[in-house]
């Protein structure tokens, strides 16, 4: 496990603490917000450099695994997330939107680290990455409109503009880079190693420019912990039952578990920054996610190794 990946929860937590602690410094507070989108775009550019879209057809090599993970990630999980969010976050629409955006986006990076730790099928997990990335970009606005259009909380133009700025443009630039530079390994490695730094810088900017909002809504922000923990527990149990019933071997079961538990909060955060201007609680709710998720995934990887002996 790479040092930066291992320290990711601590780095994000430190960015939050520094952002809040320095929120009284006006020169920082006045300029940090304008850099949030830039750092998130750089982070996603690096992510898109890593994603092997040319291997998209490999997603369907093991059709049973692909079908199972897609059903859980893009049909079951959105419904479960909306149910849990409505149950525990009712009355706070912005926190609810942040929670739903987190739940709707399967992870495209660190889940591979935890799959490896749990001795799952890395090649199978990697093969599902491109289709997970494409589907979450396509379906995220669809589910947001489906769940929140009746709340008058969604601006269709802002969502479209956000996806253009922070997703489509970095994606096209990444593909152009790969096309023009056949030997782009150094660039890819640089941006890969800097992804957590770009994310931490964006998180610092969010909390530095919104310190007063955090302190005045602390109880609402912490309320996201309960539905998120329940999400992990329910899906962990579901993965075990499903894998047993369709006779997955242990390696495929471990891969399914990590693919359906890990969430892609950086992508959701990047889209939320421009989709919900002036609604900082949406962003703050998203940032809290990794502080819970990464320690949970570490614990799950150890649990899976214990299950492996009896599987």
Image: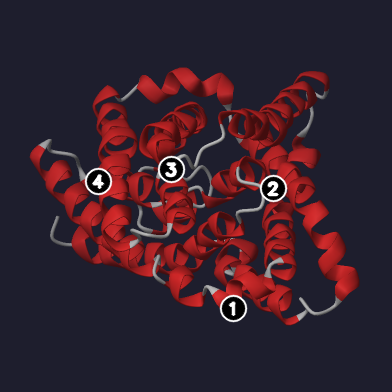
User: How far is mark 4 from mark 2, CA to CA?
Assistant: 28 Å
Q: Is residue 243 above or below residue 96?
A: above
Q: Secondary structure at mark 1?
A: helix
Q: Secondary structure at mark 2?
A: helix
Q: Earlier in the sequence, mark 2 or mark 1?
A: 2
**How many numbered dots are placed on residues in this image?**
4
What is the x, y in percent for residue 222? Answer: 44, 72
Q: Are marks 2 and 1 in contact (CB under 8 Å)?
A: no
Q: Secondary structure at mark 4?
A: helix
**What colour scheme governs how the chains and residues are painted in the rendered image of this protein?**
secondary structure
User: How far is mark 3 from mark 1, CA to CA?
Assistant: 30 Å
Task: Please identify, in this view, whether the residue under mark 2 or under mark 3 is nearer the observer.
Answer: 3
- Which of the labelled discs sits on residue 192, or is there none? 2
Residue 120, can we see it?
Answer: no
Q: Could you say which quadrant of the image residue 150 lies in?
A: top left
Graded by Cα atoms within 10 Å as few (under 14), some (14 to 19) or many (20 or more), the crowding at tag 3 reads many
What is the x, y in percent for residue 132? Answer: 45, 33
Q: Is residue 29 above or below residue 169?
A: below
Name the residue located 76 percent from the left edge and 50 percent from the top edge: 39
User: How far is mark 3 from mark 4, CA to CA?
Assistant: 17 Å
Q: Closer to the camera, 281 or 11? A: 281
Task: Please identify, in this view, whether the residue under mark 3 or under mark 1 is nearer the observer.
Answer: 1
What is the x, y in percent for residue 144? Answer: 44, 37
Q: Are marks 3 and 1 in contact (CB under 8 Å)?
A: no
Q: Earlier in the sequence, mark 3 or mark 4?
A: 3
Q: Secondary structure at mark 3?
A: loop
Q: Which residue is mark 3?
A: 106
Q: Earlier in the sequence, mark 4 or mark 1?
A: 1
User: How far is mark 2 from mark 3, CA to CA?
Assistant: 19 Å
Q: Which residue is mark 1?
A: 215
Q: Could you say which quadrant of the image residue 151 lies in?
A: top left
């Amino acid at each position: 496990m790479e040092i930066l990946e291992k320290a990711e929860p601590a780095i994000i937590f430190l960015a939050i603490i520094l952002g809040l602690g320095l929120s009284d410094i006006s020169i920082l507070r006045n300029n940090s917000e304008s850099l949030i989108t830039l750092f998130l775009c750089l982070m996603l550019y690096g992510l898109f450099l890593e994603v092997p879209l040319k291997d998209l057809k490999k997603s369907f090599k093991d059709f049973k695994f692909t079908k199972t993970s897609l059903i859980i990630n893009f049909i079951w999980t959105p419904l479960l997330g909306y149910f849990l969010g409505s149950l525990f976050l009712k009355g706070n629409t912005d926190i609810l939107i942040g929670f739903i955006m987190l739940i709707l986006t399967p992870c495209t990076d660190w889940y591979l680290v935890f799959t490896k730790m749990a001795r799952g099928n890395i090649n199978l997990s990697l093969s599902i990455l491109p289709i997970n990335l494409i589907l979450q970009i396509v379906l995220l606005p669809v589910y947001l409109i489906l769940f929140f259009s009746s709340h008058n909380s969604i601006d269709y133009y802002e969502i479209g503009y956000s996806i253009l700025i922070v997703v489509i443009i970095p994606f096209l630039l990444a593909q152009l880079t790969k096309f023009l530079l056949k030997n782009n390994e150094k660039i890819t490695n640089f941006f890969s190693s800097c992804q957590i730094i770009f994310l931490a810088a964006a998180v610092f900017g969010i909390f530095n420019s919104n310190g007063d909002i955090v302190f005045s809504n602390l109880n609402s922000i912490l309320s996201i912990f309960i539905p998120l923990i329940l999400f992990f527990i329910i899906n962990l149990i579901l993965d075990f039952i499903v894998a047993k019933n369709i006779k997955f071997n242990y390696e495929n079961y471990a891969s399914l578990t990590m693919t359906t538990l890990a969430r892609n909060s950086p992508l959701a955060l990047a889209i939320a920054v421009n989709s919900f201007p002036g609604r900082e609680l949406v962003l703050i709710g998203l940032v809290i996610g990794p502080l819970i998720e990464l320690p949970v995934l570490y614990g799950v990887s150890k649990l899976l190794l214990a299950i492996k002996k009896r599987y």
